[in-house]
Image: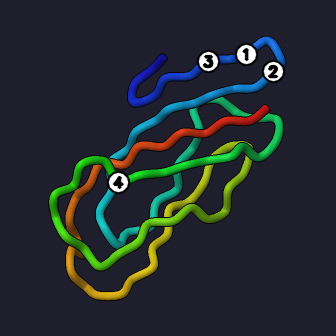
Amino acid sequence: SGSGFYWRKYTDGRIELFGRFGLTIGALLDVVFPKVFTENPMIFIQENGNPEVNGWVMRVRSLSKTGFSVAWNQWSGSGAGTAIDVCYHAIGK
């Protein structure tokens, strides 16, 4: 484990990584994995417990062995600029 993440490695070489980061709704962010995969992992991201209603959908783009970028789709400006906590789960080799 480390600051803002936990990981484990399986005997078949797969890595499972759980991480957390803060970001502002509407802002772009590049996230670097604390452990490097040998192939692009499967990833899930989720806004963690933000009570604010917002008009933005967070998505992953530019997924690679070393990290990913957070991008947004917007259907209204509601919530823009709000600080949120995001959790992610990546698994792969």
Residue ID for mark 2: 13
Q: Secondary structure at mark 2?
A: loop
Q: Quick one: SS at disc 3?
A: strand
At label 4, the amino acid type is Glu
In the depicted structure, whether residue 53 falls above or below residue 21: below
Looking at this view, is 93 or 62 the one in front? 93
Q: Position of residue 75 (x, y in %)?
A: 36, 87
- The structure residue drawn at horizontal position 45% and vertical position 20%, both measured from the top left corner, is 2
Q: Separation of disc 3 and disc 2 at Cα?
A: 10 Å
Question: Residue drawn 73% across and 16% down?
Answer: 10
Instruction: Give coordinates of residue 33: x percent, y percent.
Output: 59, 38
Reading the image, the residue beneath label 4 is 47
Q: Which residue in the structure is indicated by mark 1?
A: 10
Q: CA distance from mark 2 to mark 4?
A: 29 Å
Residue at disc 4, secondary structure: strand
In the rendered image, residue 68, in percent from the top left (x then y), is placed at: 60, 54
The structure residue drawn at horizontal position 48% and vertical position 43%, both measured from the top left corner, is 88
Question: Which residue in the structure is indicated by mark 3?
Answer: 8
